[in-house]
Amino acid sequence: MNLSFDDKVALVTGASSGMGLATARAFAEAGAAVVLADIQEDVVSAEARKLTAAGHKALAVRCDVSDDAQVEQMVRLTVAEFGRLDAAFNNAGVMARIAPTAESTRQEWDRVIGINLRGVWSSMKYELQQMQRQRSGAIVNNASVGALTGNPGISSYIASKHGVVGLTRTAALEYIRHGIRVNAINPGLIDTKIGRDVVSGDEQAYNDIAKNVPIGRAGRPEEIASVVLWLCSDGASYVVGHALTVDGGMTVV
């Protein structure tokens, strides 16, 4: 299977750490010119410099995905720098602050939905416009195993991830005849900051949860990156509108 991305251009949102950074690095190592987008401009700038120093093509862009104008500019800068857009991983997201639904706030709902769901919609909107001009491209949206079930205390997060899967499936049907494939991934417990935020940084609680995953551990960001690259590759050319669960067996039991 050929996972080379030579002469391709990839865009990753939420690229300052975790799954986003691991995926940006993986795209670069596979030959792609990569754009690292994140609200933490200083962090992605430093990571882009590291990739450039290692001989890769990389660009850092500050982007708050809840701001449509910034998202449009992100895609515009990508094309201005590298000429096209072949692959996108819409990964930027936040965890909800834990509270039962009746005790949650409109402000918190708007924050989570604005980033996790509207941010994916906005990113896809401008990515799809560019890919339509090319008549080619692949998009992967980062959902969650939370898109498959409920989870008490984080209703806005769960709702946002269910929405990402529905949005993915709909866009996939709309754009496959334009040569564009849209898919999603549902990561389980992955060793990232957002994963640890669920237990408020309690190391013992996190380790206990990880041990209860059927595989016996949390996933690594690099394991998600490898799935994203496959979904964006020609090896997944017949995969359309799928939400691929990558969870170490969490949702099997």
Image (cartoon, grey):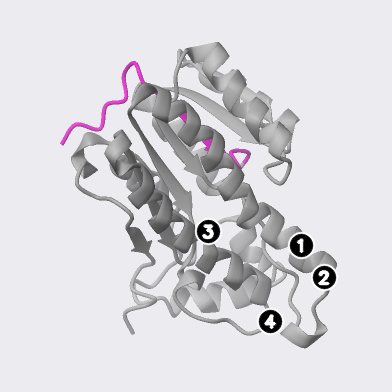
Q: Relative to residue 75, is residue 245 depicted above or below?
A: below
- In the displayed structure image, the side of residue 7 where residue 204 appears, left or right: right
User: Looking at the image, which is closer to me, 86 or 68?
Assistant: 68
- In the displayed structure image, the side of residue 107 where residue 88 appears, left or right: left
Measured Cα–Cα span from mark 2 to mark 1: 6 Å
**For the residues bearing labels 2 and 1, Cβ distance under 8 angstroms:** yes
Measured Cα–Cα span from mark 4 to mark 1: 16 Å
User: Looking at the image, which is closer to me, 235 or 67?
Assistant: 67
Q: Quadrant of the C terminus?
A: bottom left
Q: Relative to residue 141, is residue 56 depicted above or below?
A: above
- In the displayed structure image, the side of residue 188 where residue 93 appears, left or right: right
Which mark is in front, 1 or 3?
1
Measured Cα–Cα span from mark 3 to mark 4: 21 Å
Quarter of the image where one finds residue 81: top right
**For the residues bearing labels 3 and 2, Cβ distance under 8 angstroms:** no
* Mark 3 / mark 4, whichever is N-terminal: 4
**For the residues bearing labels 3 and 4, Cβ distance under 8 angstroms:** no
Q: Position of residue 212 (x, y in %)?
A: 44, 80
* Mark 4 / mark 2, whichever is N-terminal: 2
Q: Residue 106: which numbered mark, if any?
A: 2
Image point 27% across, 26% down: which residue? 4
Q: Residue 110: which numbered mark, if any?
A: 1
Which mark is in front, 3 or 4?
4
Residue type at mark 3 is Asp
Boundaries of the magenta span: 1-16
